[in-house]
Image (tube, helix red, strand yellow):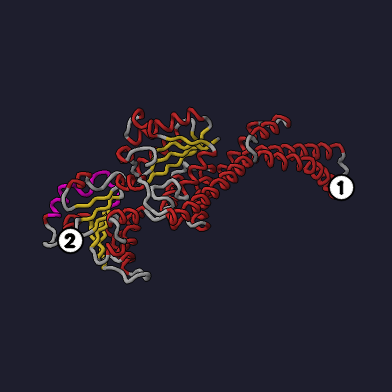
Amino acid sequence: MSVLVVGLSHRSAPVSVLERAALTADQRAKLLHDTLAAEPAVEAAALATCNRIELYADVDKFHAGVAELSTLLAQHCGVSLEELTPYLYVHYEDRAVHHLFSVACGLDSMVVGEGQILGQIKDALALGQELHTAGRLLNELFQQALRVGKRAHSETGIDKAGQSLVTFGLEQLAAGTEVPAWVAGKRALVIGAGSMSSLAATTLARAGVGELVIANRTLERAERLAAALAGDPEQAGPVARAVPMGQVDAELPQADIVVSCTGATGLVLTAEALESALGQRPAGRTEPLALLDLAMPRDVDAAAHRLDGVRLVDIETLAEASAAPSDQPAASAGPMAADVDQVRGIVSAEVAAFGAAQRAARITPTVVALRTMAADVVALEIARLEGRLPDLDDKERAEITQTVRRVVDKLLHAPTVRVKQLASTPGGAGYADALRELFDLDPQAVAAVSRADLNDANRGRA
């Protein structure tokens, strides 16, 4: 079995396609169940963020797997396969591992080095575990990806480049002004209380915003977030309060900055609501209403771009800004390039180590089946000996049994250790086949060991 990933991201597709293809939590769950029901896949996990949708699976057939995963993505995204196909990318085996490790390190992010992707990978793994669609291989792959991402952030300076998408968005709104100077004393409205909205609220609070209002469908979550921000010991703390989602329209006229990132399937802020809010703003306020929309699909009506008195930055704006040539001086760009190169080296080394470990693990059921067969042969021969020599006392019988077992273990030790070493090299899968052929091992016995390992892994996750 091998890892296959089929997906699309801001690098392969326009934001308009990503927005239409965005998956709700329920759709992700259904996608995973349907992927597992498809013949080529035995495990599945879905990574969905504001700028990527990826379906990972453990498959035994490459072409059938690509066809099935592409079709399933199209069905659950609601975008026709014909329209979606030009934007899809496919990675298989080591290239799939390399891709996920790069994503975990922030190398494939809209903002290079951002750390929020680690939380999103963790969420993808948790969903696969909860639905029992992630088995041994994907559990190990995603857990290792999280370790690789943490290693990259702790061993390199990628964090210096890795500002969050929130900070990047606020910088675009500030248009050349330092974010703390721009937000100082302003009133901010954050819509949503999930991970990205919480990050936005925290970023605004620490930057020095004067007042912070958190609006959320579940008021209790908004209240907890507001209380935590008001009591943050790292800064004086803004005036922070929570309101239900129904009060957003009433809060808009008083807001200077609005950040929205909800899981809503429809618009949260329409152009009409924004236009009405602009008409109710206090007299003398000359700065435009600054809107940061980090949701996918979008929370804020795209028509807001055309409203006088509104400055809207959304995922599409951020994608364009991240793709634009940097105006950073070469002297300051050098260290960042060195950090990126160092992270790429970490990723390459970790991919090689993961591949070697997986190849070695594939031969383990064969080795276990061989040793089980040898133990059965020893037991049968000892039983036959006892029948022919009934006068053996317990001490003699134990000594003979131990001697026969030592002989078998010594004969099997070198070939089984060596075959594990050889199996960890590229192309080493053939050694397991050779071992099964040479010792005439029952394929069903090998398969039974594999199933037992998978059941143990599932029990460990329960």
Q: Does the magenta run of residues contain 83?
A: no
Give whichever of 415, 382 is nearer the camera. Answer: 415
Q: What x and y, as percent, mark residue 440?
A: 71, 30
Residue name at image x 31 percent, y 50 percent: 294
The mark tally for this picture is 2
Q: What x and y, as percent, mark residue 173?
A: 27, 55
The three-letter code of the residue at mark 1 reads: Glu
Earlier sequence position, callout 1 versus callout 2? 2
Left or right? Give the position of 312 relative to 423.
left
Q: What x and y, as percent, mark residue 381?
A: 80, 37
Residue name at image x 22 percent, y 52 percent: 311
Residue at the spot of label 1: 396
Foreground disc of the pair 1, 2: 2
The three-letter code of the residue at mark 2 reads: Gln
Gap in Å between the C-alphas at discs 1 and 2?
93 Å
> Is 313 drawn above or below residue 421 in the view shown?
below
Give whichever of 71, 102 is nearer the camera. Answer: 102
> Is 67 drawn above or below residue 341 in the view shown?
above
Residue 254 is marked as 2
Can residue 298 be seen in this snapshot?
yes
Residue that lies at the very extreme toward the front in this rendered image: 330
Can residue 115 be seen in this snapshot?
no
What are the residue bounds of the magenta stretch? 260-278
Q: Does the magenta run of residues contain 276?
A: yes
> Is 270 drawn above or below residue 225 in the view shown?
above
Residue 314 is marked as none
Q: Which image quarter is the N terminus in?
A: top right
Residue name at image x 34 percent, y 62 percent: 202
Give whichever of 17, 219 is nearer the camera. Answer: 17
Q: Of helix, strand and loop, which one carries label 2? A: helix
Left or right? Give the position of 455 relative to 277.
right
